[in-house]
Image: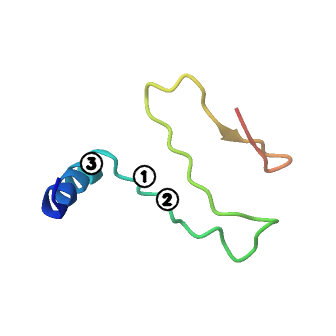
Amino acid sequence: MDINNLQEIWAQIRLVLKSHPWHGVPIGINMPSVVNTYIEIVPTDTVKYEIEKNSGYLKS
């Protein structure tokens, strides 16, 4: 197998195995007391999350 063929194979693999767009989001300057986070919820999810108003914690 030559190097050009190998590079083409990896190019095809990268098309299928893309990293999630939120990977690499900075943790935030106030960590560890406050961290940046993104929670993606799609309509078909059976578990939903909400902020518990008294404590500010995320719960399901």
Q: Can you give x and y, in whole percent of width and height, for residue 21 in the image? A: 41, 57
Q: Secondary structure at mark 3?
A: helix
Left or right of 3, for residue 49: right
Question: In the rendered structure, are the residues bearing label 3 and label 2 in contact, judged by CB atoms less than 8 Å apart?
Answer: no
Left or right of 42, for residue 50: right
Cα distance between the residues tagged 3 and 2: 18 Å
Q: Residue at x 49, y 59 (%)?
A: 23
Residue count near mark 1 (Cα–Cα under 10 Å), binned few <14, some 14–19, many ≥20: few
User: Identity of the amino acid at label 2?
Assistant: His
Q: Residue at x 44, y 34 (%)?
A: 42
Q: Which label number is shown at residue 23?
A: 2
Outermost residue toward the bottom in this view: 29
Q: Which label number is shown at residue 13?
A: 3
User: Identity of the amino acid at label 3?
Assistant: Ile
Question: In the rendered structure, are the residues bearing label 2 and label 1 in contact, judged by CB atoms less than 8 Å apart?
Answer: yes
User: Which residue, given by chain and number where applicable, does mark 1 sit on?
Assistant: 20
N-term mark: 3 or 1:
3
Cα distance between the residues tagged 2 and 1: 6 Å
Q: Nearer the viewer, mark 3 or mark 1?
A: 3
Q: Residue at x 65, y 67 (%)?
A: 27
